[in-house]
Amino acid sequence: MATATSLGSIRPGTSEFSAAAGVEIYFWDGSDSTWAPAQQPTNWLNDGVATDMPPTAGIAAVISSGRCEVGPSTQTQEALLLDVGGTGTVRVTHDSGGLPITAYVNIDTGGTLEVDRDTQVSCGEELAVASGGVYSPQIGETSSGLIAAGGNVYVNSGSEVKFRPTGASMFKAGTYTLITAAAGSSIAGTFSVADGLGDYFSNFTYGSNSVSVTVSHDLHPGDANLDKTTDVRDFNVWNSNKFGSDKEWTQGDFDGNRVTDVRDFNRWNTAKFTSVGEAAAGPGELPAAGGNAAAAQIATTPGLIYWADYGTMFVYNYDANLTSMVIEGPSAVSIDRWQSGTFQDGMYWSQRNFAGAEQWYGGMDGGSVPQNTSFVVAT
């Protein structure tokens, strides 16, 4: 199937852009930055030279590497063509006001176009998604990201939709419009892969002028792996990403602030060991009969998390507030009783060093189910 425009495209497997004669091209410099910040200079190159102006009318904007973000303070112009491919990513944030393109949008092989909830990328003429291209709409409570084309839409075999749920606006069961084409135009082809909705995905619908997705249930709080159940596997996701930034729902960011932290743990904690359609258990309660047996077994078992960056241990029993303490120990050469990562003397032991001090703790590490209801710190 042909791409949408003869103005040019990124050659598959490369960062090389093949342009039609007379088309001026601005290349993204491969950095992780904004399209054009309020201050100068920008991250665009024209004939290999940095330019103080972002792409304007009549100019092709090509992102073949790096990550280009369109946000609320971004100065955008209506470029003639937006082409993202190679290893490039463009993200249009929900508070950006959208990204207008005069004529064409190409999502070429290897490229990703991320469009947040409640916003859109609009193009005056045609949209093409090549094989290996990824359209990644964020899906929220009332709407998903949208691409609105003024002409035909071409979806090539091997293309992908990668959904991004968000805790800032958790999606509800229903149908969300992902792409529209203008009246009198058409949508040709179908996406080969749908990823990012897990067991909530129902189906795609391809109309004469739109592509939409139907989700089967409301997104369940704390369900990081999208299997309709909030359990220890979702805790493990949170634990693996804890205290990290630039995170998403499937990385334990359950409140949508792009940081995985204690607030997200609290959301998991409230809904723990429940499934779609079930209410959360109250303090001290086990899941309802017939629920997750493993979850019921550990529901009142204490847990332990170690934060190596600060030498701090968090202890919790799921229904109590987190408690933290700094672990202090001797120089990191003295304890030679256990082997890190092994189960000995009734404990699963892990050893870390912080500020030259040796720190041993037993009970739980790396998101494993606790081996014992007691925890030991050896210094």
Image: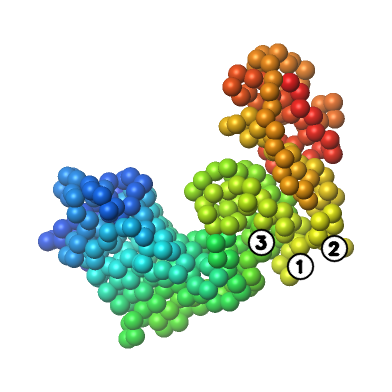
- Residue with the mark numbered 1: 278
**Where is residue 305 shown, x and y percent of the image?**
69, 38
Disc 1/disc 3 C-alpha distance (Å): 11 Å
Q: Mark 2–mark 1 contact, CB under 8 Å?
A: yes
Query: Residue 307 vs residue 191: left or right?
Result: right
- Whether residue 147 is visible: yes
- Residue with the mark numbered 2: 288
Q: Earlier in the sequence, mark 2 or mark 1?
A: 1
Disc 2/disc 3 C-alpha distance (Å): 17 Å
Query: Residue 369 vs residue 246: left or right?
Result: right
Q: Residues within 10 Å of mark 3 (few under 14, many from 20)?
A: many
Q: Front-most of 200 and 245?
A: 245
Placement of the C terminus among the 4 image quadrants: top right
- SS at circle 1: loop
Hey, what amino acid is under mark 2? Ala
Query: Residue 155 vs residue 78: left or right?
Result: right
- Whether residue 293 is visible: no
Q: Front-most of 207 and 318?
A: 318
The structure residue drawn at horizontal position 37% and vertical position 58%, both measured from the top left corner, is 71
Hey, what amino acid is under mark 3? Pro
Placement of the N terminus among the 4 image quadrants: bottom left
**Where is residue 235 shown, x and y percent of the image?**
69, 49
Q: Earlier in the sequence, mark 1 or mark 3?
A: 3
Q: Residues within 10 Å of mark 2 (few under 14, many from 20)?
A: some
The structure residue drawn at horizontal position 48% and vertical position 70%, both measured from the top left corner, is 144
- Residue with the mark numbered 3: 221
Query: Residue 19 vs residue 243: left or right?
Result: left
Disc 2/disc 1 C-alpha distance (Å): 9 Å
- Specify the quadrant of the image occupied by residue 122: bottom left
Residue 215's place in the image compared with 39, above or below, is below
